[in-house]
Amino acid sequence: MLRESGQQTGDDYDLGAVNGGRGDGGVIAGAALVAFAEAVVAGVAGDIQSARRAVIQALGPAAMVDAAAVIAQFNAIDRVADATGTPLEPAKAEATADFRPGLGINDFPSAEGKI
């Protein structure tokens, strides 16, 4: 979604920032948002609290709530897809083929047999 919106707006986003990269990825407070998402997925309470505070400081409390909702939704969608073995749709596989290897997505255990 971010890549597509960047193509529409002319913005250049570094998707590598979301998978172990550095920096903000071209997104305002991107590093804080990535740290928040990673903390939530890891489930370490102290890290979540610190990351939450960093997002609030950078973007405000309403943005932190929005970010938390996005993190929760993406986590839920991925878990349902993984649990049911839902394959990636052919059109999405084609549209993402150029950047999946660079992000290591094809190497995720949950990607096996789905791409």
Image (cartoon, helix red, strand yellow):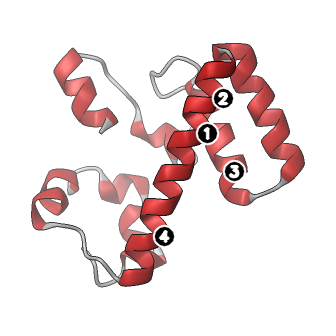
Q: Nearer the viewer, residue 109 or 5?
A: 5
Left or right: where 38 falls relative to 5: right
Which residue sits at x=67%, y=39%?
35
How far apart marks 4 and 1 lie (CA) works out to 17 Å
Q: Nearer the viewer, mark 2 or mark 1?
A: 1
Q: Which residue is mark 1?
A: 68
Looking at the picture, which amino acid does disc 4 mark?
Arg
Earlier in the chain: of badge 4 and badge 1, it is 1
Left or right: where 16 falls relative to 60: left
Q: Nearer the viewer, residue 109 or 42?
A: 42
Looking at the picture, which amino acid does disc 1 mark?
Ala
Crowdedness of circle 4 by 10 Å Cα count: few (<14), some, many (20+)?
A: few
Residue 22 visible? The answer is no
Looking at the picture, which amino acid does disc 2 mark?
Ala
Q: Which residue is mark 4?
A: 79
As helix, strand or loop, the secondary structure at mark 2 comes to: helix
Q: Which residue is mark 3?
A: 40
Q: Nearer the viewer, mark 1 or mark 3?
A: 1
Crowdedness of circle 1 by 10 Å Cα count: few (<14), some, many (20+)?
A: some
Instruction: Tell me if label 3 and label 2 are in contact, CB under 8 Å.
Output: no
| Residue 90, quarter of the rendered image | bottom left
Crowdedness of circle 2 by 10 Å Cα count: few (<14), some, many (20+)?
A: many
Left or right: where 113 falls relative to 26: left
Q: Which residue is mark 2?
A: 32
Instruction: Tell me if label 1 and label 3 are in contact, CB under 8 Å.
Output: yes
Which residue sits at x=36%, y=82%?
112
How far apart marks 1 and 3 lie (CA) works out to 9 Å
How far apart marks 2 and 1 lie (CA) works out to 12 Å
Residue 69 placement (x, y as % from top left):
55, 41
As helix, strand or loop, the secondary structure at mark 4 comes to: helix
As helix, strand or loop, the secondary structure at mark 1 comes to: helix
Q: Nearer the viewer, mark 4 or mark 2?
A: 4
